[in-house]
Amino acid sequence: MADYAAEPASRGIGRSLLLTLPVALWALLMFSRALMLPGVAVKVAALLTLVFLVTLFFQMVRTRQTNRWRRWFFATLGFLFPIGFVWELVALRGSMSIPMEKMIAGDTPFCFMVIPMILLPAALTRTVIFPGAILPTASNPHSIAAMIGLWMAATLVLGKGWCAYGCFFGGIEEGVAAMPRKARVRKIDGRWRLVPWAVLAAIVLLSLATFAPTYCEWLCPFKTITEYAEVRSIETAIQAGIFLSLFFGLVIVMPWLTKKRTQCAFFCPFGAFQSLFNKIHIFDIRIRRDQCTDCVLCQNSCPTMALNKQSVADDKTLINCMHCGACVDICHKDAAVWHIKGTPVGTAPERARLLHLYAAWGFAIMFGGSIIAGTLTKMLGFLG
Amino acid sequence: MRLLTEAALLGLASGPACLASCGPVLTPWLVAERAGWRRAFGLLSVFLGGRLAGYLLFAVAAGLAGATMPLGARERALLFAAAHLGLAATLVAYGLRPRRRAEPPLVTIGPARRSWMPVLLGLFTGLNLCPPFVVAAVRAMETGSVTGAVLFFLAFFAGTAVWFVPFAALGALRVAETVATVARFTMLALAAYYAYLGILTLLGRLLHG
Ligand code: SF4
Ligand code: SF4
């Protein structure tokens, strides 16, 4: 029998502290090395990050709201990642652009966005079509093996939740989308949601045909704030133009106008690929039909349009749900709920949420936390 | 006879390269068609017919020119650009074409409407100067006559065509409406890529003579 008893609005402080304790210990373990390193900047950065992440978790537990607090972490990650990354590039090679010689030498840092493109060529020909190093080197610590290992771990723990707890690029859009008070563009055709699948199909087919990482060469909006090939020809100039237009259009202007993560929802092929892993993920969001009033608040709140009329009627989300929790937070009828697959919908949804959060926040501290702390260290060191 | 065997073997050996070259066009198109086995084979045959027409046109033109090299760099670039732009236009037309009606009309007057698009897709992919095509063109020119070149391309085509048969399975898939829509979007994305290749080649020619 499903347990539909309404939960009290917020938890007591003592109980919330107790539930936060495992995460605090995990964070302490993760940052213990940094806290013991010589130098004030590194210690202060680690401590600030630790306190920030543990406080957010505490608030998620206390208020029973997920997205409201998760967004702060995610936007911070999105803001600090490019700063730290570019800082590192400039320190290593004096510029954001990567010269051809470095590419040939396999010095391009590997990015998880490439994964869907390299799988088929690697399976068919045992060739990795990316100019990076398989194992970490002194000049390129972001090796192919390390990133694929990290992605596999994240996928097991989070499924598509990678897009809400791991992807620093998504953090930038989330930060921009959170700024305006109201969306100026509200009516968006649901078919745009299919475009990321088409981009995924196109880049996989073209990568097989050309044996080149097509997405990185032509379509990655995030080259604008990470690194790009040196502009030396018409071709590289056009590429740079495409990167800039996609970045400003989909990551800045459209999120501002729609309050949605437009790059993630309407373009990102990696997000589409990652959605497939929701099928094997044990957590999902469900709708209790008997509580739902079809008010569409949840649909409007979803940053990736993973809910529509039909899916709400079918009591579930679409495949591209990233488990951000915005729909659950906003549902005033407690109809949108966290759920563990295989259990009846509505059985202890708060327990399902907490279990999901332990896994997701554990990953967030390890991955996003280390990026935030790393960048803060550089910034504090710079300030003296 | 020896030459024809060589052409057929060259075609067979070039199969994977042909698939890599034509696969990006064939895959979304056939998935979007949701044709069923019979119609999928029909569509594939028309596509291959278009592709053969592309080969033969090239063979006749090059044979008539009587050159030892199939084309000069300038002509090659122009043909490459035209084929890519044509392919892009066909993909756009296909991607944006209104969907076939789910139910056939009760009464159909006049002959069934035929679409030229599979022929055009075949023709433009046939002319897209992929590496095996260029190798075949060089060998065909060495035959020294139009007939020789045409026969060489016919045998080469037969060798490559074998590799395309499994694609019919994609057309036979009865995928959901959503997947078919994704396939159409994919054709539009690929159209942008081929259009870009065509335009870049033209620009390169204009700027560098
Ligand atoms: S916000 Fe809640 S009540 Fe409103 S449509 Fe969504 S699930 Fe139903
Ligand atoms: S359906 Fe809900 S949890 Fe999933 S992405 Fe949309 S708002 Fe977030």
Image (spheres, coloured by chain):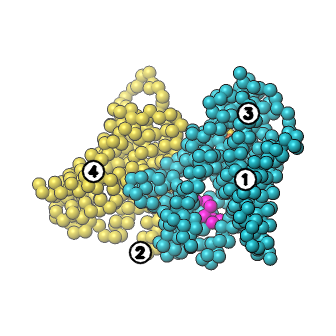
Residue A138 placed where, x, y %? 56, 73
Which residue in the structure is indicated by mark 2? B209
Q: Amino acid at mark 1?
A: Trp
Secondary element at image label 4: helix
Residue B86, percent across and down? 41, 54
Residue at mark 2: C-beta within 8 A of ligand 2:
no
Mark 3, residue position: A349
Q: Is residue A210 left or right of residue A374?
A: left
**Residue A313 percent across, percent down from the top left:** 67, 28
- Quarter holding the N terminus of chain B is bottom left
Crowd class of label 2 (few under 14; some 14 to 19; many from 20; radius 10 Å): few
Name the residue tied to disc 1.
A26
Q: Nearer the viewer, residue A143 or B177?
A: A143
Q: Residue furthest right?
A: A13
Q: Could you tell me if residue B27 is visible in this image?
A: yes
| Closer to the eye: label 2 or 1 | 1
Question: Quadrant holding ligand 2?
Answer: top right
Q: Mark 2 to mark 1: distance in Å?
A: 65 Å
Check disc 3: other Cα within 10 Å, few if <14, some if 14-19, many if 20+.
Answer: many
Q: Looking at this rendering, what residue extends furthest in the left direction?
A: B1
Q: Disc 4 vs disc 3: which is toward the camera?
A: 3
Q: Nearer the viewer, residue A129 or A140?
A: A140
Region of the chain picked out in magenta, as a range: A217-226
| Three-letter residue code for mark 2 | Gly
Q: Is residue A192 visible?
A: no
**Label 3 is placed on what type of residue?**
Pro
Q: Chain of mark 3?
A: A
Chain yellow in the figure, letter? B
Look at the image and say whether residue A337 sits in the magenta stretch: no
Q: Is disc 4 in contact with disc 3, using a CB cutoff of under 8 Å? A: no
- Marks 3/1: CA–CA distance: 24 Å
